[in-house]
Amino acid sequence: MIAARLNAFPWGKMKFDQGDFHTDRFKANFSVAAFRWSNDDDNNSYTDAPGASTDPDRADLEGADGWELSAGLRGHGLSVTAALNGITGDTIDPAFSGGLYANGTTDLDQVSLIGGYMVVNERFEIVLGWQSQDADGYMDRWERTQFGLNYFYDRHKVKAQLTYTMGQNLFGETGVDAVTTQLQLQNFF
């Protein structure tokens, strides 16, 4: 695997964590990244010796390439992150179709935008998010809209997150929608 990332901080270094505790000025980050991964054939769980997939829902990858463009803004209680990702992958079995893949390949595109604002004495953050993912094997674009509330007990070390997610076309299947609520507790040592 080969990977590279370049970050630029035009107004000074900022934290990547969601949640800004009302710092006195805005800081921004701009990033570009890329990777290339090639299979060394050490652990192909879903491919037989002639190179055919043994599972109708999973396949081993021959290789994948990807890129990312992302940006973040933090300051005065506001936290915003945006990202664009593109990944191309090829399965060992050139005829495999399932999940992300159609005829042994996929072009996966992802877009995300997440924003939050700190309220009530730097303890609570209201968060909104939108994400979209499309792949060659999908019938339709998978989209998620999220609303959340973060409670910070000890800044980023101890926090609780409550997230309400509305998903459309889950896993690229047209008309398959779901609503989930998730509670997550986080403690960094």
Image (tube, helix red, strand yellow):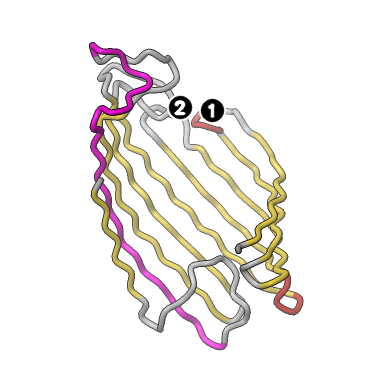
Label drawn at residue 109? none
> Which part of the image, by quadrant, shows the C terminus?
bottom right
Measuring from the top left, give residue 104's x and y in whole percent.
Answer: 29, 23
Amino acid type, mark 2? Met
- Which residue in the protein does label 1 denote? 174
User: In front: 134, or 20?
Assistant: 20
In what element is the residue under mark 1?
loop
Residue 2: x and y, percent?
23, 49
Tell me if residue 123 is in the magenta stretch.
Answer: no
Name above or below for residue 20 compared with residue 87: below
Residue highlighted by disc 2: 139
Instruction: Give the residue at x 50% y 82%.
Output: 26
In the rendered image, residue 110, in percent from the top left (x then y), is placed at 42, 46
Judged left or right of residue 161, residue 25 is: left
Mark 1 Cα shell of 10 Å, populated few (<14), some (14-19), many (≥20): some
Q: Earlier in the sequence, mark 1 or mark 2?
A: 2
- Badge 2 marks a residue whose secondary structure is loop
Which residue shows up at 23% across the image and 37% down it?
Answer: 38
Magenta stretch bounds: 24-50
Give the vertical position of 105 relative to 81 (above or below): above
In three-dimensional space, the C-alpha distance between marks 1 and 2, rounded to whole angstroms, equals 6 Å
* In the foreground, 48 or 29: 48
Amino acid type at image mark 1:
Thr
Q: Is residue 46 magenta?
A: yes
| Residue shown at 28% from the left, 38% from the top | 64
Find out whether the residues at labels 1 and 2 contact each other: C-beta distance under 8 Å: yes
